[in-house]
Structures are given as structure tokens and as C-alpha cells.
């Protein structure tokens, strides 16, 4: 939230607090006749008008933007009260609205404090290495490329890569998980995480406002304030309810000719409590999710999770560990294995796909010299084309090589298909128009994947779909093991989108789980895009509707639990509101409630659903 917004909120907070104090004192002085010789009517008129102004302005702004809000109903009630000289009623309405705004500010303040508590995790000072010297500097003076020293018990001040040392790191500030992770040379570390044991030297890659911590805080803050693309139940309710109340009130006025009765009805049915209680419930739950390392980018997405029927998942890196291992190397000519790996790893080194990373890591473990490449062309989900030392090198699926003019004999085709039937993923290598060999790879299914799939039906998810670029045999084994409803193999990125579009046509809420980088388009297309393992990955966080910082599937179940609980509280709020309004209307038509007492009745009962929502902060 920017500085101007904070100033504006503080001004309105003190304005509301002053309005509540003065209006409360006016009512006390008037009812108790503390100063019987003084006529308080002019003061009631003045503060009724002052309190009406911001509500009226808010309602007009909403109408200009073609939105119907509860402020419109409150404005109509206030105008009715002022026209009929019902000053006490107007004061009670202002008290209701002012209290609603104060509660909204309290929620925002709690969210801001939660964010500020995260900022406290960032150290003020850090140590950087300059040659043989270690210098203490202000964190703001660290630059990209600096070597930062982090010792046991210290907080990591930057995002970067370990270049020296090893340590166990607590990442709970970002992921919500207290389990430590081991970090050594070549691993990524992130700001605000803590070295529990060990010493690291980190080359700074992101500093200041570009770090994962700062990005996390910014996104949580935006999620609390930005309007989500999916309409929430409160938005839909406001539209039809206000229309019904206004039309009903006009009909009653025409039939009875009693503006006092209409005003009483408006005061009883003014739904400012629901207008506060429902967003409050979502804000509390989104804050809870944020503490567990899950960023929900709008209340609409949290509500949509409760209506989820179809869950689509990518396979590699989502249902498997995303670290395929090279199991076999088959070379069709007399090329030395190290030379074969040199060409393959050098080409794959230009890709961020998990399979490509695994090949590169395997080659490094074999002490293979990886060289720079030229004229790089990556075909997402299919393969990569480069030039190495004047040679045209293509790596990827065997059918991709065929499309690019690589000659593959029937014998070699048979060897590739035999490996695929054994459940291996195949990455083939072609040089100067001829295939030279392939690597056969396997990826393990995550241990939590099976219990994850078993729990989904309990949250209303009755259709599970696995989409993968892997071959039919690999995909079928995974789908059968996890008891997925459907699976589709050998898919290119565009074909994945086609399947999602088909599932979206069923008019159920559809979620897609992926890594947020290779699956960015699919995540954007689904009703709810959930990116897993997004810690340190800017593109993943930006592309998804929900970003989960670590890669644990149990977090999706936790989100579904939060969504269900939020929905229960919201339903309870509507039930409470309905019962209270029913009682209020019954008392109105029985002649017991008049405008003034109706305003007092509504003021007192407003707190019931709001207090119910506050339970979610526990």
C-alpha cells in the first residue's frame, strides 16, 4: 500500500472515530437529559449531514462505475431520515456506517502489521567479503554480485546462489514450514530465511525491493486490496438485494403512503453488517493462507476453491519430484559417451525445463565440459536447436527430431520405442541431420501424491485430470497409481490448453496446478491457476491466481480446508443476518419498531455476523 493511501486511511479513521464519539455523546446527552435547558436538535442536524456526506459520495462514485453497493441503500435511508426530520435515526445510521468503516480499518491494520512483522525478519546490517576482508555494511548498500557472508543464527539478507560453504536453512518465513533444508554450493537461498547451522558465502542476485521477501509482501498486500476477476457472493448479493429492497420500499410507499414505515424498513434491512462481515471473513482467511506461504490473489479465488469440481495437474515437478534421473544412455555410432553428453548437455543448458536441468546436472557429475552455444531456438515442450562448433545440434523428442529432418532408421526407432514401453522418458540427440543416440530417464512420484488424490473427493473434487508431455506408458503408470480420473499424454503446450478449454466448457470451477513457468499459459486459462514451488520464481508468482511458495501438495489441501471453513462462516453470516432481519421486519409490521428504534436495533444486531467473521482470525 502506498504512502498516500495510508494517509487517507488514517484521516478517515480519525474522522470516523470523532463521528462515533460525538454522535454517541449526543445520544447519551439527549436520552439522559443531562443538559435539559439546551436544544440539541441543531447538533443532531449538523452531524447527521456531516456523516451522510462520505456515504453519499461513495454511493455516487459506485454508480458512476456501474456498481451497486450497500452505501446506496444507506444513502437512501439517510435521505429519507433527513427529509422526515428523523435526526436520531440519521445519527444511528451514521454510527452503523462509521463502525463498519472502523472495523474495515482494523482488518487492514491487522494485515499491515502482519506484513510489517515479515519486514522485521530482514536484517539491518550484513557482512560482505572484499578479497580477504569481511566488511559490515548497511543492507541497503549491498549490490548485485556482492559476496555476502551468513553465519550460524544469522538471517540471509539477499536472494542469491551459494558459492562457498554449507548450512541448514529455516525457510518458514516464506513457506510456512518449519522443516529446515540443506544448502550447499550452487543452491539458491532467499532473503529472510535463517541459517540454523553452518556458514555460507552467497553471491547476491536480488537485493532490496527485488528480493523474494519484498515480492511476497507486495503480493499479499495487493491481494487484500485489489478487486478479483471472479465475483464474490457479497458482490452478487449486493446487486439483487438492494434492487429488491428499493423496489419493495417504493411499492409499500405507494400502497400505504407512509414514509415513516418505509424508513423503518430501510433501517432494519440496511445490510451494512454483511457488507463488512463477508469481506472480513475472506481477508482473515487470505491472511492465514499468507502465513502458511500461500498467496491468494483475491477473495474470488478463495471462494471459487470451495466450488471446485475439476482439478487438472501437470505431471513433471507437480506429481513427481521434477528431477528425472538419467538411467540409460544409448549411442548409435562410435561417439564417446563424454562427447555425446557434451553436445546434449550444452544444448539442454539453454532450457529451464526440469528434464533439461537434470541432463545438465548429470553431465556435470561426469565431469563433462559444457560449452557455449549459438543460434539457440527452443520449442517449448518439444526440443531445442542450437549450433555448437559449427555443427547443427538438435535435442528433444524423437518425433521432433524427425520433423526437423533428422534421419532415424527403423532399428533405432525400435530401440527408442522399446525404452518408452519400459516407462522411460526419452531425450534424443541429432547432429548434422543424423541421430546419434538418446538418454532414457525416470522421475519418481511424490510420496504425498497418492494421499493427496485420495483426499480430493472429500472437498468436492470429483474429476482429476493429468496432462503431460511424456509418453503414454509413463503417463498411464502415474495415473493408475494415483487413481486419476483421466490422463492425456504426448501433449504439446498448445494441446494442454485445448484440453483445459474443453473442461472449462462443463461450467464447473476448474483449477490447474503447475510450476508456473512452463505452465504459465495453462494457469492463466483455468478458473483458478495454482503455481507450486514458486519461491524465488518471479514468473511463476505473477502468472498464477494462487502461488504456493514450496512444492508440497498438502498445501493445496490446506487451501481447500481454509476455503471450506471460510464458506461455512459466510453462510452462517447470511443465516444470522436473515434471522435478525426477519425479526426486525416482524417487529416493524407489528408496529413495535419505529424509525429511531429500528436504527438502534440494526446498530446492535450489526455486530453479530461481524463478530462471527472475526473467529477466522484465531
Image (cartoon, helix red, strand yellow):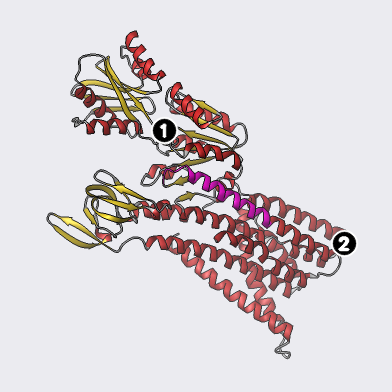
Residue furthest to the left: 132
The local secondary structure at tag 2 comes to: helix
Instruction: Judge whether residue 343 can be spotted in this image.
Output: yes
Q: Kindly report which numbered mark, 2 or 1, lies closer to the viewer in this rendering.
A: 1
Left or right side of 7 for 585:
right
Q: Which residues are magenta?
A: 550-573
Q: Which mark is residue 353?
A: none
Kindly identify which residue carries mark 1: 316
Q: Please name the predominant secondary structure of the magenta segment in the image.
A: helix
Whichever of labels 2 and 1 marks the residue nearer the N terminus, that label is 2
Q: Nearer the viewer, residue 5 or 347?
A: 347
Q: Is residue 536 above or below residue 12?
A: above
Name the quadrant containing residue 247: bottom right
Q: Nearer the viewer, residue 236 or 310?
A: 310
Where is residue 429 drawn, in percent x and y?
29, 20
Graded by Cα atoms within 10 Å as few (under 14), some (14 to 19) or many (20 or more), the crowding at tag 2 reads few
Q: Is residue 364 above or below residue 270?
A: above
Where is residue 612 drawn, in percent x and y?
64, 61
Kindly identify which residue carries mark 2: 256
Q: Is residue 129 above or below residue 478?
A: below
- What residue is at 34 percent from the left and 14 percent from the top? 415
Residue furthest to the bottom: 37
Distance between the alpha carbons at the discs numbered 2 and 1 = 69 Å
In the image, is residue 552 part of the stretch drawn in magenta? yes
Residue furthest to the top: 410
Amino acid at each position: 500500500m502506498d504512502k498516500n493511501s495510508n494517509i487517507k486511511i488514517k484521516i478517515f479513521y480519525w474522522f470516523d472515530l470523532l463521528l462515533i464519539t460525538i454522535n454517541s455523546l449526543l445520544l447519551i446527552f439527549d436520552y439522559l437529559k443531562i443538559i435539559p435547558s439546551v436544544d440539541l436538535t441543531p447538533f443532531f442536524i449538523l452531524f447527521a449531514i456531516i456523516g451522510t456526506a462520505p456515504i453519499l459520495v461513495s454511493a455516487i462514485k459506485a454508480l458512476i462505475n456501474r456498481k451497486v453497493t450497500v452505501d446506496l441503500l444507506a444513502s437512501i435511508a439517510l435521505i429519507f431520515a433527513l427529509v422526515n426530520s428523523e435526526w436520531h435515526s440519521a445519527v444511528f445510521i451514521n454510527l452503523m456506517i462509521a463502525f463498519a468503516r472502523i472495523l474495515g480499518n482494523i482488518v487492514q491494520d491487522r494485515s499491515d502489521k502482519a506484513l510489517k512483522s515479515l519486514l522485521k525478519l530482514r536484517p539491518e546490517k550484513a557482512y560482505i567479503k572484499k578479497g580477504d576482508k569481511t566488511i559490515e555494511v548497511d543492507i541497503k548498500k549491498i549490490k548485485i554480485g556482492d559476496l555476502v557472508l551468513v553465519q550460524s543464527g544469522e538471517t540471509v539478507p539477499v536472494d542469491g546462489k551459494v558459492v562457498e560453504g554449507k548450512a541448514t536453512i529455516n525457510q518458514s518465513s516464506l513457506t510456512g514450514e518449519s522443516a529446515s533444508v540443506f544448502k550447499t554450493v550452487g543452491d539458491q537461498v532467499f532473503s529472510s530465511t535463517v541459517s540454523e547451522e553452518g556458514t555460507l558465502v552467497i553471491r547476491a542476485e536480488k537485493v532490496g525491493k527485488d528480493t523474494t521477501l519484498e515480492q511476497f509482501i507486495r503480493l499479499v498486500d495487493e491481494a487484500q486490496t485489489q478487486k478479483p476477476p471472479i465475483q464474490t457472493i457479497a458482490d452478487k448479493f449486493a446487486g439483487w438485494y438492494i434492487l429488491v429492497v428499493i423496489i419493495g420500499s417504493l411499492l409499500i410507499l405507494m400502497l400505504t403512503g407512509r414514509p415513516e414505515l418505509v424508513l423503518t424498513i430501510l433501517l432494519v434491512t440496511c445490510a451494512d453488517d454483511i457488507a463488512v462481515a463477508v469481506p472480513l471473513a475472506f481477508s482473515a482467511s487470505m491472511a492465514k493462507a499468507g502465513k502458511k506461504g500461500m498467496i491468494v490473489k483475491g477473495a474470488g479465488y478463495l471462494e471459487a476453491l470451495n466450488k471446485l469440481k475439476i482439478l487438472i495437474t501437470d505431471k513433471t515437478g507437480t506429481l513427481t519430484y521434477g528431477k528425472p534421473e538419467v538411467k540409460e544412455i544409448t549411442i548409435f555410432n562410435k561417439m564417446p559417451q563424454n562427447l555425446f553428453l557434451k553436445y546434449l548437455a550444452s544444448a539442454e543448458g539453454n532450457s529451464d525445463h526440469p528434464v533439461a536441468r537434470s541432463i545438465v546436472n548429470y553431465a556435470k557429475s561426469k565431469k563433462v565440459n559444457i560449452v557455449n552455444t549459438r543460434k539457440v531456438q527452443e520449442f517449448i515442450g518439444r526440443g531445442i536447436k542450437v549450433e555448437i562448433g559449427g555443427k547443427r545440434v538438435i535435442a528433444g523428442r524423437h518425433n521432433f527430431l524427425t520433423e526437423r529432418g533428422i534421419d532415424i532408421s527403423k532399428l533405432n526407432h525400435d530401440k527408442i520405442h522399446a525404452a518408452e514401453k519400459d516407462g522411460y522418458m526419452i531425450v534424443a540427440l541429432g547432429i548434422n541431420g543424423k541421430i546419434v543416440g538418446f538418454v532414457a530417464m525416470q522421475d519418481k512420484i511424490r510420496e504425498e501424491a497418492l494421499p493427496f488424490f485420495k483426499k480430493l473427493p472429500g472437498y468436492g473434487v470429483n474429476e482429476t485430470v493429468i496432462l503431460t508431455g511424456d509418453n503414454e506408458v509413463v503417463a498411464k503408470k502415474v495415473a493408475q497409481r494415483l487413481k486419476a480420473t483421466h490422463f492425456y499424454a504426448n501433449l504439446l503446450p498448445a494441446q494442454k490448453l485445448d484440453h483445459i478449454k474443453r473442461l472449462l466448457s462443463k461450467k464447473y470451477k476448474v483449477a490447474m496446478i503447475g510450476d508456473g513457468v512452463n505452465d504459465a499459459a495453462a494457469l492463466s486459462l483455468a478458473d483458478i491457476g495454482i503455481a507450486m514451488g514458486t519461491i524465488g520464481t518471479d514468473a511463476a508468482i505473477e502468472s498464477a491466481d494462487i502461488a504456493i511458495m514450496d512444492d508440497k501438495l498438502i498445501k493445496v489441501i490446506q487451501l481447500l480446508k481454509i476455503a471450506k471453513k471460510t464458506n461455512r462462516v459466510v453462510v452462517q453470516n447470511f443465516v444470522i443476518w436473515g434471522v435478525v432481519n426477519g425479526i426486525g421486519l416482524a417487529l416493524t409490521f407489528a408496529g413495535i419498531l419505529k424509525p429511531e428504534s429500528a436504527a438502534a436495533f440494526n446498530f446492535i444486531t450489526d455486530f453479530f455476523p461481524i463478530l462471527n467473521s472475526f473467529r477466522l482470525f484465531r
